[in-house]
Image: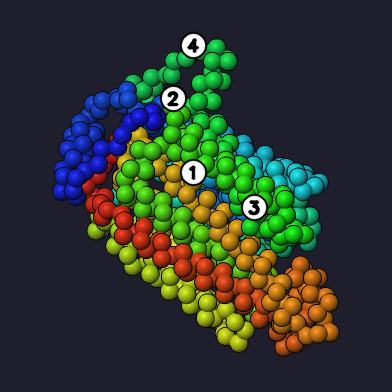
């Protein structure tokens, strides 16, 4: 899309509503217009082909697509048991690469079509699983995790875009609830299956899904290609003509179109800026270490260069016009601040439950899965509320304070001596609120734009979310590495004080001391102090989420119809 395009803003809600109704009147209605026009020329190829496909198929085809979508998500969700606990460095790198992958995936889905973009992400995810199963060193493992994260994020993103292509805006939250429904079934499948693979051969945890993923993923690709051909056959679209460019001209074209320089500067800048917060404590001179200072300086320079480059390139990585709408800014800001707040404490939550509350690995995993189960079920009522009322903002005005309450209560109940039931209660509050954010923020950004911008808007939302996750992981790592060692040295009995380093670095050593032992109590208090600082940071950041929520317009989504053909 062109950098010099501008997004026309409505002067007030009434004017905006009339403009949208006027635009909607021009859209195809299968009940009144038996001969719909073919997609307009100004649409991007991927969007035009998606609209042609939805006009060419019937209701059974639409249902079949959603079955394939659910099938694919089941494979993604269940495969999470194969993941190792990533060290913070790899987690930050994977998050940053996944963030950048959103915008690249959006370009692919718009420039070519949805099916080829989906297939590309499927290949990357499978490659990541294969590399994970075969890796022999940390370097291969890091590369595998990047491929794995980018691929699976791309699959989910492609499915989100397909959901936007095939559902009315007022039903969009319900459609997303349907695609998320497998979480309710598979959330508790991971721990026991993981244990079985761990007891036999962990590599087969990755290897098995390197086989399963293509088996469940390729049928949807074939389904999309078939209906693409049907759309051409029925005259709703035409085959894409050859560009006539030479190989070198094509390379130059796509370098500009995908803003390769911008992507490189953003990824490099974020990684180099965020990593020192996790690495500084391990350096001999901490923040004075030359390599830490160099990473920070180069990272900041890259981010500044990214901002400058984006101002002048013909195809910017982040289209400025999309950020001219306060609803888009509000939704992206909500996603960014919420992800920071969550990842400020979530990275060490499992070990916290084991050390402070004495829970087993599987029980800790079950508590961690509370969010997944509730999210899968609660998104349906949220979708129904939006469908019935036509508005999404009131949902956020209730759930953002609810999330702040849940995280705030965790600060109080983090210490040993409280029942684990209180922690479960806080997780339930956080799950109800967080799952509401997931649905509503997607509906919000799509309500503020056109169908032609759907992929870019969802990508922008994902970009802010994953950058927020990377920032949250950095804060978590910084608090952990700067708080826990000092807290251990302050609380441990004198006879074990020389061993504080081995206690700090090894969870098994921490768990080897029984509940009630003075050493275990000292470890629990150190964990409580570190967790307290993480939660305070996360709760404070959620104040930004409330501000971004207030920034959004209260758009009536039931008055907007920006898709064509047989849709949900």
| Point 50% across, 66% down: residue | 538
Specify the label residue 157 is tagged with. 1
**Of 212 and 77, which appears nearest the observer?**
77
Sequence-wise, the earlier of marks 3 and 2 is: 2
Helix, strand or loop at label 2? It is helix
* Labels 1, 3: front one: 3
| Point 77% across, 81% down: residue | 513
Specify the label residue 275 is tagged with. 3
Residue 416 quadrant: bottom right
| Point 38% across, 38% down: residue | 320
Q: Is residue 375 left or right of residue 18?
A: right
Helix, strand or loop at label 3? It is helix
Mark 4 to mark 3: distance in Å? 44 Å
Q: Quadrant of the C terminus?
A: top left
The mark total stands at: 4
Q: Is residue 255 above or below residue 431?
A: above
Sequence-wise, the earlier of marks 1 and 3 is: 1
| Point 80% across, 47% down: residue | 137
* Labels 2, 4: front one: 4
Residue 351 quadrant: bottom right
* Labels 4, 3: front one: 3
Mark 1 to mark 3: distance in Å? 26 Å
Helix, strand or loop at label 1? It is helix
Q: Is residue 237 above or below residue 192?
A: above
Q: Is residue 125 above or below residue 92?
A: above
Question: Where in the figure is residue 293, as x and y percent of width and height?
Answer: 67, 51
Sequence-wise, the earlier of marks 4 and 3 is: 4
Specify the label residue 244 is tagged with. 4
Mark 2 to mark 4: distance in Å? 23 Å
Q: Which residue is mark 2?
A: 229
Helix, strand or loop at label 4? It is loop
**Of 482 and 8, which appears nearest the observer?**
482
């Amino acid at each position: 899309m062109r950098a010099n395009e501008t997004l026309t803003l409505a002067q007030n809600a009434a004017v905006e509503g009339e403009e949208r109704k006027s635009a909607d009147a021009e859209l195809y209605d299968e009940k009144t217009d038996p001969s719909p026009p073919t997609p307009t020329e100004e649409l991007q190829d991927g969007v035009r082909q998606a609209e042609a496909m939805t006009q060419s198929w019937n209701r059974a085809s639409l249902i079949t697509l959603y079955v394939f979508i659910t099938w694919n998500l089941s494979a993604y969700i269940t495969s999470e048991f194969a993941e190792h606990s990533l060290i913070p460095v790899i987690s930050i790198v994977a998050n940053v690469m996944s963030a950048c992958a959103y915008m690249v995936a959006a370009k692919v889905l718009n420039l070519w079509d949805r099916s080829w973009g989906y297939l590309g992400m499927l290949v990357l995810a499978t490659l990541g699983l294969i590399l994970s199963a075969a890796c022999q060193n940390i370097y291969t493992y890091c590369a595998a995790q990047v491929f794995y994260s980018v691929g699976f994020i791309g699959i989910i993103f492609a499915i989100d875009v397909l959901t936007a292509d095939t559902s009315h805006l007022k039903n969009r939250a319900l459609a997303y609830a349907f695609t998320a429904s497998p979480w309710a079934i598979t959330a508790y499948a991971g721990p026991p299956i993981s244990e079985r693979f761990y007891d036999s051969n962990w590599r087969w945890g990755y290897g098995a899904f390197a086989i399963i993923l293509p088996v469940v993923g390729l049928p949807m690709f074939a389904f999309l290609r078939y209906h693409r051909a049907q759309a051409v056959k029925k005259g709703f679209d035409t085959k894409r003509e050859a560009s006539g460019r030479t190989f070198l001209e094509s390379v130059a074209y796509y370098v500009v179109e995908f803003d390769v320089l911008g992507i490189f500067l953003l990824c490099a800048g974020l990684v180099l800026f965020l990593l020192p917060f996790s690495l500084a404590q391990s350096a001999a001179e901490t923040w004075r270490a030359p390599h830490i200072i160099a990473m920070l300086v180069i990272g900041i320079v890259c981010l500044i260069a990214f901002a400058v480059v984006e101002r002048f390139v013909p195809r910017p990585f982040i289209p400025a016009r999309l950020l001219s709408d306060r609803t888009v800014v509000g939704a992206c800001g909500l996603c960014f601040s919420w992800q920071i707040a969550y990842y400020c404490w979530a990275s060490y939550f499992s070990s916290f439950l084991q050390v402070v509350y004495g829970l087993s690995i599987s029980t800790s995993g079950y508590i961690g899965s509370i969010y997944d189960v509730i999210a899968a079920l609660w998104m349906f009522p949220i979708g129904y509320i939006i469908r019935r009322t036509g508005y999404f903002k009131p949902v956020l005005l209730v759930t953002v304070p609810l999330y702040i309450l849940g995280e705030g209560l965790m600060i109080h109940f983090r210490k040993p001596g409280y029942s684990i039931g209180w922690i479960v209660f806080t997780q339930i509050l956080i799950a109800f609120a967080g799952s509401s954010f997931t649905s509503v923020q997607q509906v919000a950004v799509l309500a503020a734009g056109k169908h032609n911008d759907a992929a870019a808007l969802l990508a922008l939302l994902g970009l802010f979310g994953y950058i927020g996750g990377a920032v949250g992981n950095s804060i978590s790592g910084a608090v952990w590495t700067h708080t826990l060692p000092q807290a251990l040295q302050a609380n441990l009995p004198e006879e074990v004080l020389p061993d504080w380093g081995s206690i700090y670095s090894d969870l098994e050593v921490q768990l080897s001391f029984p509940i009630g032992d003075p050493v275990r109590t000292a470890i629990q208090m150190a964990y409580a102090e570190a967790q307290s600082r993480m939660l305070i940071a996360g709760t404070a950041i959620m104040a930004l989420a409330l501000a971004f929520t207030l920034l959004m317009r209260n758009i009536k989504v039931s008055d907007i119809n920006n898709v064509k053909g047989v849709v949900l």
